Every structure is written in C-alpha cells, then in structure tokens.
Image (cartoon, grey):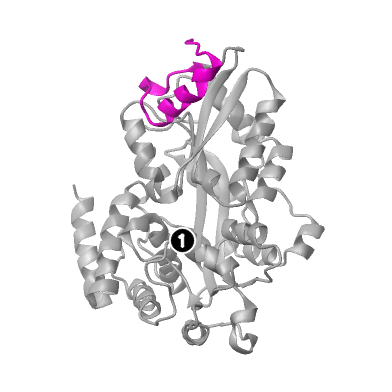
Amino acid sequence: MKLFPRRSTLAAIALAAAGLLPSGAPIALAQGKTTITFAGVTFTEAGRGDRLRSWVDKYNKSQDKIEVQTIGLPFATFANTMFTQMGGGGGPDIIRFDTIDFYAAVPAGRVLPFDDYIKDSDYKFSAPNDYLKVNGKRYGVAFEISNYVMMYNPALLKDGKVPATFDELLAIAKSASGGGNFGYAYRATMAERNGFWQDLCNFVFGFGGRWGDGTNLTLNSPKVIEGVAAYKRMYDSGAIPRGADAATYRRMFWEGKVAIEIDNGGVAGIFNQQAPNLQFLAAPSPFPTRAQGLILAPLTVNANTKNKDAAFAFVKWALQPENQKDLQDILGASSVATVVPRSADDLAKKPWLKIYDDQTPNAVPQLVAGFEVRTPELQQIIIEQVLKVLQGGMDPKKAMDEAQELAVAKMKK
C-alpha cells in the first residue's frame, strides 16, 4: 500500500478524481487510514450537498480504518467525466450514477457486481432496486429513488387554480407569465441531454407512450407522438425561460419567479431547504395518465478500484437502518434503498411528501423497455429528433418516424 504524507493526500485524491492515478490506486493517510473517493452530482447541489457531505463524515467519524472523500461534479459533465476516467483505468472508488449511465456502465464492465458483499436477504430493499440487477446479478443499490409530480407556487396562479389537464396547464402557465415571471420551466437543450430526457419522458409517459414494449421499439407510436407534440406546444407557449438550465430555473422557482414545474422529489427537498418560507404545493402531473418517470440513482463500485473491501464496507454502513433514515431525511421527498417509513410530523410539515410517495405505483424508469442497456444510444437519437421538432419546426410524426427508422437500424449493429 502506497503511503502519502498528509499534506499531499488531498492532492493525490484530486489526481485520482481526475483519473491521473492508475487504476484507482490506493491512497492511505499517514495515520494508517485507507482513503477512498465517492463521486456524485448530489454533492454539488445547493442545500443538499453540504448535508450529504456531513452524512459521509458521520461514517468517517465512526471508525478509524477508512476515510471517504466526496467529489462533486456538475450534472452536465458528470457522466462523460466518469466514463473518461474509468476508460483510462482510474476514476473514483464509489460512484452515484443516474440510471441511464448505470446501464451503460454495466455491460462495459465499468462497475463491480455486489453479490459477494451484499445479500438481498439481509435488507428490506424497495421494489425499484430490482432494476439494478442485470442478468441476475446486482450491480448497485439505490442511493436515491425519486418520483415526479407537479410542483406549483399558488401565489403565482391566477385565482389559485391548479391545472388538472394539459390544456389547463398550458393556459395557466401562459397567464402566470410576464413581468419577469414564467409559468413553467423544463429542459430543452443538448447541453443538458440527460435532464432533457427526464423531462421528455414525463410528457411521453404521461400521454400513455412508451419507447419500447419489451420486445420492439415504439418510438413512433401514436401516444409517443402525442407526448412529443405536447412538449412542442409548451416550448412554443412563451411560458418557459428558453435556454435556462435546470440550476437557473429551479433557483427562479424558489425565488418566486416560476409558477409550475414537473420535477422530482429531490428538487422538492432542495426548495424546502433553500426557501423554507416558500409555500409551494404539489399535485399529480396534469396529463391523460398518471405515469411519470422515475429517477433511480444507484450507488456503484468502480471496477478499477484497488480498495474493494473499503468501498463495500462503506456501502454496508450506508444500508444500516439509522443511516438510511438520515439519508432519506436529507433527500427530501425521495426515498432510499430500503423501506423507511415517514414520520407523522414530517407528513404534517411537508404535505407534498405524500403526493410524491403516492406516485410510486405509477413511476416508470426512464429507460427503453426491452433495450435497457442500449438506452443511451437510443436517447441520443430521440433527443436529436425532438430538437428538430422544437428548434426546426419538424412535424412530430415525421421526426419520430425517422427516429424509429434510425433506432431500428442502430439496434441491428
């Protein structure tokens, strides 16, 4: 085991994070601790980031053999950075991925199976954790499970009316816009491709569409086209801050400048922490069906790590009931790997928690059914075609017919 003087430890960690140390080379403090790294977008989030670092520090203070150093990277660059580092034989020891990147990492052999360390029978895992098994092997456990519902600021809605249909959503969003305020906000740029995909899935799923039926691609099915057309109607409505990234428009929401968002429970928690006096509420998304996307962010272990035992020791600590409850409290309206009931006090203080929890039976992973491991390739095709609709004015049916043709050809390779 290579030892570094303490002053150089942080520099070494930075090198490891940048993929400049070979194959997750072990780093140990002079005091004898093995130091491992844990990367996640969530460590950069306003409000939650600091609390999550404190949660990790609780582990560091609980024992004297391992120290976990957190690494926060922006959502827009996180996946590319991780895959570049891992492809070069480096990268952090523990990674909190998004689902779509998890399904790219597993077949590429970038993450380790959990089965030698984590037994399902030892934990009360919630149902979405089953999505983290590939060919019968578990490659991760949920760090965060988050549903999507509609959040709104009643103070910005005319007469306080809450939309129950998509047409009402459009009309109310328009009426709430003006004077520096916007009625609605979502992502629609390639720069935020993964977030764009999440928002698009909510529209398509809400209109009853699915990208695949488990066997075949269905990118040009009538319900998918309805969802894409609705996305375009909102884009053209004049009610959205075009070009604003998620960090910007979410801040605008808690500053009282955006009236409505369809967003995940983690964001609701951020709003509550950043603006505790903001009286926002939640309701089911106003689409023809209740189906909405599901964020399932897995905790994974880098296949390049030389600190496998230390990495899984932290995962086991994270799954202990007390630490799961602490993590769920930090994550707001999201839930964690194991089933953790909410307290009556929490439900009374944060009525939106129940709306998020009630959405679970209608939550659909943001994947292409039957083509899960190839979702990143299909996502690229779909997003490019939808951008032609939004920015180029292409007819939604024509765009999705082309998407289907391109995707079918891609899947034959």
Q: Which residue is outermost to the bottom?
A: 159
In the rendered structure, the answer to whether residue 21 lies left or right of residue 44 reads left
The residue segment tinted magenta is: 1-27
Q: Is residue 389 above or below residue 94?
A: below
Q: Which of the 4 quarters of the picture holds residue 302? A: top left
- Three-letter code, disc 1: Ala
The reply to whether the magenta stretch includes residue 24 is yes
Can you say whether 12 is above or below 174 in the image?
A: above
Residue 260 visible in rendering: yes
Front residue of this view, candidates 152 and 363? 152
Give the camera-side residue of 99 and 1. Answer: 1
Q: Residue at x 27, y 76 (%)?
A: 396
Q: Where is residue 292 shown, x and y percent of the image?
A: 50, 65
Marker count (numbered): 1
Q: Residue at x 28, y 51 (%)?
A: 377
Q: Position of residue 73 (x, y in %)?
A: 45, 43
**Relative to 203, 47 lies left or right:** right
Can you identify the residue that label 1 sits on? 246
Element assignment for label 1: helix
The residue located at (34%, 63%) in the rendering is 189
Q: Tell which residue pokes out farthest to the right in this image.
A: 345
Give above or below for 34 relative to 84: above
Horizontal side of 132 relative to 341 (left or right) equals: left
- Examine the rendering and report whether any part of residue 107 can be seen: no
Q: Residue drawn 41% across and 44% down?
A: 78
Q: Position of residue 110 (x, y in %)?
A: 38, 32
Quarter residue 369 falls in: bottom left
Q: State the residue in front, 62 or 246.
A: 246
Q: Is residue 356 above or below residue 153?
A: above
- In the rendered image, residue 287 lying in the magenta stretch gets the answer no
Please name whichever residue, 270 or 408, is drawn nearer the observer in this view of the structure.
270
